[in-house]
């Protein structure tokens, strides 16, 4: 990189006043700090914040605001995750109901959604490609994978707890990839709160709720 003193012709190189003026001007108009800030806050998807992520969202085609996935915790079973109540504590609830109130994603969750949408835009939607996407997005969280169920059906399986904003991204954003005309279910099992058979690692009567997969609607 060019040193500022190299811009001073030799006959003025020993002029303390001139050298100080040139050095001061270099510090005042040095663009490096602004370029670093632009790169970190806008250009680099791993560190972008606020408006920078909004720009990335417009580039890949996904909004920060998505429908919120929530469940009524006052029923027995048939809810995705540890929100339902076990036997003796609540009546049955049939099916899963998503509440379509708007959820504005925080930066970290929105970054995840942007990366999902970017991968979806270029994915071939094969099982190996989707499994690689899950491993990249949820590294260190636990086992997650896709299953080809046949008959134009597929399951996304997560063997660890998903945060509410992650569940909303997966089920309601329309960004998670799947082959055309294939029905997509989301399986998010948590053994500590799910009712199941003996020796399955799941919970007995009165201690866990029924589990049913979340069926994700076809894209409009």
Image (cartoon, grey):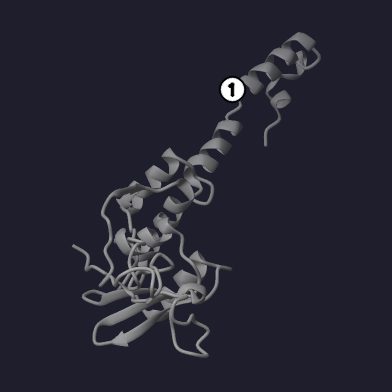
Q: Residue furthest front?
A: 88
Q: Residue furthest top?
A: 17
Q: Residue furthest bottom?
A: 199
Q: Nearer the viewer, residue 69 or 48?
A: 69
Above or below, 125 against 71 in this view is: below
Above or below, 147 against 58 in this view is: below
Relative placement, left or right, of 62 versus 31 is: left
Q: Nearer the viewer, residue 31 or 88?
A: 88
Which element type, helix, strand or loop, lies under badge 1?
Answer: helix
Q: Could you tell me which residue is drawn at 69 percent across and 25 percent down?
A: 4
Q: Is residue 13 visible in the rendered structure shown here?
A: yes
Total numbered badges shown on the rendered structure: 1
Q: Residue furthest left?
A: 220
Spot occupied by residue 83 in the image (x, y as percentages of width and height): 40, 64
Classed neighbour count for the residue bearing mark 1: other residues with Cα under 10 Å, few (<14), some (14–19), many (≥20) = few
Which residue was labeled with disc 1?
29
Relative placement, left or right, of 4 versus 39 is: right
Q: Nearer the viewer, residue 80 or 45?
A: 80
Relative placement, left or right, of 108 versus 95 is: right
Spot occupied by residue 17 in the image (x, y as percentages of width and height): 75, 9
Q: Is residue 63 visible in the rendered structure shown here?
A: no
To which quarter of the image does residue 152 belong? bottom left
Relative placement, left or right, of 57 versus 161 is: left
Q: Could you tell me which residue is drawn at 49 percent across and 82 percent down?
A: 202
What quarter of the picture does the C terminus occupy?
A: bottom left
Q: Could you tell me which residue is drawn at 34 percent across and 76 percent down?
A: 212
Q: Nearer the viewer, residue 212 or 52?
A: 212
Spot occupied by residue 176 in the image (x, y as percentages of width and height): 35, 65
Spot occupied by residue 58 in the image (x, y as percentages of width and height): 33, 47
What quarter of the picture does the N terminus occupy?
A: top right
């Amino acid at each position: 990189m060019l040193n500022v003193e190299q811009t001073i012709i030799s006959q003025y190189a020993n002029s303390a006043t001139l050298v100080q003026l040139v050095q001061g001007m270099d510090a005042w108009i040095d663009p490096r700090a602004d370029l670093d800030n632009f790169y970190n806050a806008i250009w680099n998807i791993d560190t972008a914040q606020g408006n920078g992520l909004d720009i990335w969202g417009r580039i890949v085609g996904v909004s920060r605001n998505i429908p919120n996935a929530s469940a009524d915790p006052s029923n027995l079973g048939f809810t995705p995750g540890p929100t339902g109540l076990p036997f003796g504590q609540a009546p049955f609830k049939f099916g899963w109901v998503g509440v379509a109130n708007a959820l504005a994603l925080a930066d970290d969750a929105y970054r995840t959604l942007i990366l999902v949408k970017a991968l979806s835009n270029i994915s071939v939607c094969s099982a190996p490609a989707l499994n690689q996407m899950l491993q990249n997005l949820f590294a260190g969280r636990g086992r997650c994978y896709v299953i080809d169920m046949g008959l134009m059906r597929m399951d996304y399986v997560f063997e660890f707890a998903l945060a509410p904003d992650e569940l909303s991204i997966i089920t309601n954003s329309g960004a998670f990839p799947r082959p055309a005309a294939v029905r997509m279910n989301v399986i998010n099992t948590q053994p500590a709160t799910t009712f199941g058979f003996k020796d399955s690692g799941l919970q007995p009567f009165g201690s866990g709720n029924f589990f049913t997969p979340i069926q994700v609607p076809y894209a409009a």
